[in-house]
Image: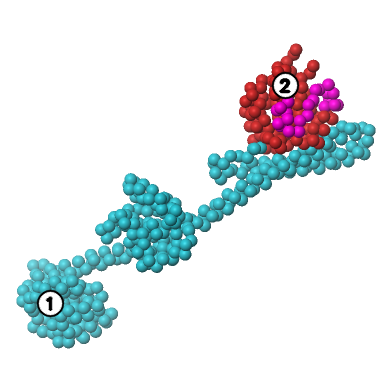
Chain colours: A cyan, B red
Amino acid sequence: MKKDNKTYHILIVEDNFGDFFLIEEYLLDYILSPQLIHASSFQEAKSILEDSENTFDVVFLDLSLPDLSGEKLIVEILEISNGLPVLALTGFSDLDFSIKSLALGVSDYLLKDELTPIILYKSIIYAIERNRYFDELQKSEKRYSELFHLSPLPMWVYDLNTLEFLDVNKAAIVHYGYDRQEFLSKTLKNIRPPEDLSLLEDALEANKERNSLFHKRVFRHLKKNGGIIKVEIISSPILFNEREAKLVLVNDITEKVHYIETIETQNRTFKEISWIQSHVVRAPLARLMGLVNLLENEANESNPELTGLLGFIKSSSVELDDIIRDISKKSESISPLDENEPTITDN
Amino acid sequence: MSPQLLIIDDDEVLLMIIEKIFKKVNPERNLSLFSSGRSALDRLEEMETDQKIRFLMLDINLKDMSGWDFLKELESQNDQFSKVILITSSVSQNNLETAKKYSSVIGFFEKPITFDVINQIENIIESNTPIS
């Protein structure tokens, strides 16, 4: 028979030497060279496990040690075994307790009287593989949980039917001012200004008809301090603890909207100013130019000195006219922010 | 008799300038001066029965109404006899574009009104006057 030639580091916590040798023998049947360390009391096991020099793949634990036994022993060992698979060994058959020990976190429950080499070997392999699988699952869950909880943007999950908050991240708590418990006792309706509730209902109704994975909309939200913010919401369906839910990402665009409104107002004022330039300011200038033209005609030839002075007034007014035309041309090249905004004409 | 020329501008100084220039360019020209759009429209209504071509120098920025409102009212009355020369103190390109939408408009000038402008207006009036 071909033996498993992988290296297994195994801690056997067993006060009965006969049982220890039996286990060692059984292990050697299937494993070429198991690295065994033997502890005969809880204290000894503890110091071995707490020594960071030692690494194990699996721990065998006899449930009746001289210094500790039963449930208490299991709890203590699991606490210091740092996620290692622990296989319980017991001399008596107690189905209730075996189930309980599994619930406490023991990987397997083996009866010494029924032990065979193959059962022992399979139990080790299964425990190690199962442990690796759960370990990876946990890591992946942790990764996704961190993506949610450490996101710099507020996020939450809400129940699609009751609208209750099922989970909120730190950014949401900081941004809205409600603590976690307050959030979880609220529904979506509680973070809307009362006058916007109909908008929420419309959106939820529209949501039901839509199947898209990601959906984006702008709403007004209410913070704990009564402040109202404009937010862009991106949501996608998610199954959360067996409940139909939505995962929501919030982007506060209050500042952005305010900024754009300011620019729009300034742009309007600016266009008004340029309109005044090209229409109102130019009217008296045009009158002045007309008068100069008339005077030039009157003064022609009869008074060369006056003609000369009028020439200066004329060139000054032309200069001013050029400036006004320049400003007017520039203002006409401003494209309206809103495509529907009419260009200003004379009324 | 040469056709009438109605000059409509709320700037009294400008009316005076125009009048003085015409005296030199064409003293025969039959001028009527109006400082509001309303008074000119009332006069036109009275002239309705004449069935004769008349010319209007119309400022786009009147105090009581815009030149565009004036033109709309004129066209709504189905006036076939009023030919309009628009004048404006503004330098906005949009005005010229808007002016093209009105069939009664036959000329467009930016202020200042000078001898040169009045000479051109005289030419427009001449070429649009039917030979009787």
Residue A107 among those drawn in magenta: no
The residue sitting at 27% across, 82% down in the picture is A51
- Which chain is indicated by disc 1? A
Q: Report x, y in % for residue A10.
A: 18, 76
How far apart marks 1 and 2 lie (CA) works out to 122 Å
The residue sitting at 54% across, 41% down in the picture is A339
Q: Is residue A61 above or below residue A293?
A: below
Say few, some or many: other residues with alpha carbon within 10 Å of mark 2 (under 14 / 14 to 19 / 20 or more).
few
Is A208 left or right of B39, judged from the image as shown? left
- For label 1, the SS is strand
Query: Which residues, given as a range, are shown in magenta?
Result: B22-43
Q: Which three-letter amino acid code belongs to the residue tagged 2?
A: Met
Mark yes or no: residue A96 visible. yes
Using the image as rendered, state which of residue A137 and residue A247 is in the foreground.
A247
| Residue that mark 2 sits on | B47
- In the drawing, what numbered circle is on residue B63? none
Q: Report x, y in % for residue B95.
A: 66, 34
Say few, some or many: other residues with alpha carbon within 10 Å of mark 1 (under 14 / 14 to 19 / 20 or more).
many
- Which chain is indicated by disc 2? B
* Disc 1 versus disc 2: nearer the observer: 2
Q: Is residue A38 above or below residue B97?
A: below
Is A201 left or right of B67, judged from the image as shown? left
Q: Which three-letter amino acid code belongs to the residue tagged 1?
A: Leu
* The quadrant where residue A314 appears: top right
Using the image as rendered, state which of residue A106 and residue A345 is in the foreground.
A345
* The quadrant where residue A35 appears: bottom left
Q: Report x, y in % for residue A310.
A: 87, 39
- For label 2, the SS is helix
| Residue that mark 1 sits on | A89
The residue sitting at 43% across, 56% down in the picture is A194
Mark 1 touches mark 2? (CB < 8 Å): no
